[in-house]
Image: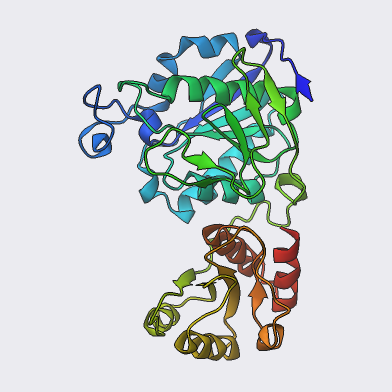
Amino acid sequence: MTVTLSVQGAEMTIVFIGTGGTISNRGTAPDNFVDYLDVGTMMPADELLAGHPEIQQISQTRVEPFGTLRSKYMTSGHWLQLAERLTSVLADDDIRGAVVSHGTGTLEETAWFLHLTVNSAKPIVLVGAQRPGSTLGSDTPLNLLDAFRVAAHPRSYGIGVAVVMNRQIHSARDVVKAANHRLDALQSPVRGPLGVLHADHVVEYWRRPVHPHTTTSAFVDVGTPLPRVDMVYAYTDADATALEAFRAAGATGLVVVGYPPGTLTKSLDDAVDAAIADGIVVVQASRAYFEPAVMTRAGLIERGLVANSDLAPQKARILLQLALAQRMDRAAIHKTFAAY
């Protein structure tokens, strides 16, 4: 169903939190699409907004300072700060929603964490860009405007965290970065986007998320440092070296990313069994995550493995971190992965 939004900017306020990334980069040359993050500089959130006065036709804005950093430097500590900040500012009755700018390299992970931990039904939109505003064909201006359009839209309530780029609206659960430099890098390969923005800027939603999030999540207001969870990939000749190193470093959980549909080398199988015997929770994922890992194969459930759903492995890791932070036992974690 298409819903046309009547834009009356003075009647609503949307909070803007800038965290850095390409969308905040000043760039160095009109045709520098590659190393601008290494040689360019980032602008603070208020300067980024000042360069796009058209936003004021959509809503009033309030800038919440956070800092500027490349997304590869984003940590779980930053996630916790963002979740706390968003929950706090969105509790204000005068605030309609929030837009968070972010580098695209790890945007999907931050979005997923916030999707599970922010205690608000108000719209939260994460937005990034593939080209700085100073480059030819930059997607920065339109992505930023579209993020505010979606945050201001009445049907954006209750969908959890959305990611808006390239005129598409994605659920934080489903979105992944599937290309390095293309403008359509952010995609939802399993279920597709939630909706789109058309050429006349009308927002159209096709579906709504069905998995728990934000106000229906078991992980809102997590408030504590996340336990260590590492990922181990299966590949030809893979042995237990990495897995044992992660255990020695204090991992309390592991996501093992197996060959499709979720199998491992003999060395990794043996190391996984030893880890489970020592009380480490192990989630079985697959390099092909378009469908859940099948746990009905002989022996997997009896071995104590937890089945990943169709989450990207890096998102399965975050869900396991949150489950372990809540001190869930293995049975509860099984149910959590089936539900989320």
Instruction: State the residue at coordinates (57%, 40%).
Output: 85
The picture quadrant where one finds residue 320 is bottom right
Q: Quadrant of the C terminus?
A: bottom right
Q: Position of residue 134 (x, y in %)?
A: 30, 21
Question: Which quarter of the figure has residue 243?
Answer: bottom left
Q: Residue at x 43, y 25 (%)?
A: 139
Q: Residue 272: horizontal and vertical position, in percent? A: 53, 85
Can I make out residue 97 in this image?
A: yes
Q: Nearer the viewer, residue 328 or 196?
A: 196
The residue located at (67%, 46%) in the rendering is 191
User: In the displayed structure, would residue 173 be above or below residue 159?
Assistant: below
The N terminus lies in which quarter of the figure? top right
Residue 166 coordinates in the image, percent (x, y): 51, 29
As drawn, is 250 to the left or to the right of 199? left
Tally of numbered discs = 0
Residue 236 locus on image (x, y percent): 40, 78
Identify the residue at horizontal 56%, vertical 89% (top origin): 273
Q: How is the image coloured?
A: rainbow
Query: Is residue 94 shown to the viewer in this render?
Result: no
Relative to residue 296, is residue 226 depicted above or below?
Answer: above
